[in-house]
Image (cartoon, helix red, strand yellow):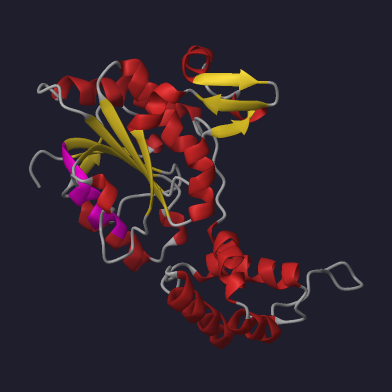
Amino acid sequence: MTDQAGATPPSTLTPHLLASVLAIVAARGGVDFRDYRAATAVRGIEARIRATGCPDATSYLGLLEQRPEEIRPLLEAILVRVTQFFRDPGVWAALQYRVLPSLSAQNTAGSLLRAWSIGTASGEEAWSIAFLLGALGNPFEVLATDVSPTALRLARAGVYPTVATLAVPSDLRQRYLEVDGERTQVRPQLRGQVIFAEHDLMSAQAVPREAVLAAFDLILLRNVLIYLDPRLQRKAFERATQGLVPGGALVLGCAEVIPPEAESLLEPFPRVAPELRIYRRRERA
């Protein structure tokens, strides 16, 4: 909605109203955004104010109090994230040719290689890593988590517009995807090896119940930290590094950095360009 000059009208979402909305979301929606970056929540709330036709934030707060069904679309609006198959090709090339072979070589016991995709959204990242692990030939398991049940339903179904899968390398597309005109589906052979679960990394439960073992060879925490304030970033790093086995790899988004207090636990992954933000857990902290 714009005014007559074409400019976006000023926000009516005062700090007090923002806190009130987020308190309702925490109480009824089960996700506490009050320590997340305010801009993340504000964008989603203002999108819902416009979508519901409310004239201002005060009216929207009243609607939210009266309509419990509004909680879910508000959650989805706040949580919306951009994802795609093999996003940031340089990162995936490093995983394919440097990181995963190294993890496989150190796994001399031949046990499962275990990966955790945090904030997996609609699942493209989780399936991408599953494709690479499947091609590697080791037994593996991917745990993919998100706070959005709607996104997880899409991820679990494994059905995507065909055009969205064009970034998948051709050999992996042929091996793991079934193309049916304008829709493409992940083949059944991978379904049992990728587990999708609802989980908030900031919740009291550091690792979801579905993890069984809180020990992972690879954790992808990409483009999650940008939504968190510094305190929660430290908490996310603490939980991610605790979940990594010694020698395991942590992958961040290309615009994200590890906090100073994590430098004793993590080091740049050998033979990987530093700007790709891939780290290895030190054998000894």
Q: Position of residue 240 (x, y in %)?
A: 26, 50
Quarter of the view holding residue 134: top left
Query: Can residue 229 be seen at all in this image of the molecule?
Result: yes
Q: Position of residue 282 (x, y in %)?
A: 14, 40
| Residue drawn at (77%, 81%) of the image | 55
| Residue drawn at (48%, 23%) of the image | 187
Q: 141 and 3: which one is in front? A: 141
Q: Is residue 164 left or right of residue 252?
A: right
Q: Position of residue 68 (x, y in %)?
A: 57, 76
Vertical order, 110 against 219 (above or below) = above
Quarter of the view holding residue 70: bottom right
Q: Is residue 244 left or right of residue 14?
A: left
| Residue drawn at (50%, 41%) of the image | 155
Q: 271 and 177: which one is in front? A: 177
Vertical order, 162 against 12 (above or below) = above
Q: 221 and 163: which one is in front? A: 163
| Residue drawn at (54%, 43%) of the image | 154
- State the residue lying farthest toward the right: 4
Residue stretch in magenta:
236-246
Q: Position of residue 41 (x, y in %)?
A: 55, 68
Image label count: 0
Q: Is residue 36 left or right of residue 242?
A: right
Quarter of the view holding residue 284: top left
Q: Is residue 8 magenta?
A: no
Q: Is residue 16 left or right of residue 99?
A: right
Q: Main secondary structure of the magenta part?
A: helix
Q: Is residue 245 magenta?
A: yes
Query: Can residue 91 be seen at all in this image of the molecule?
Result: no
Q: Quadrant of the N terminus?
A: bottom right
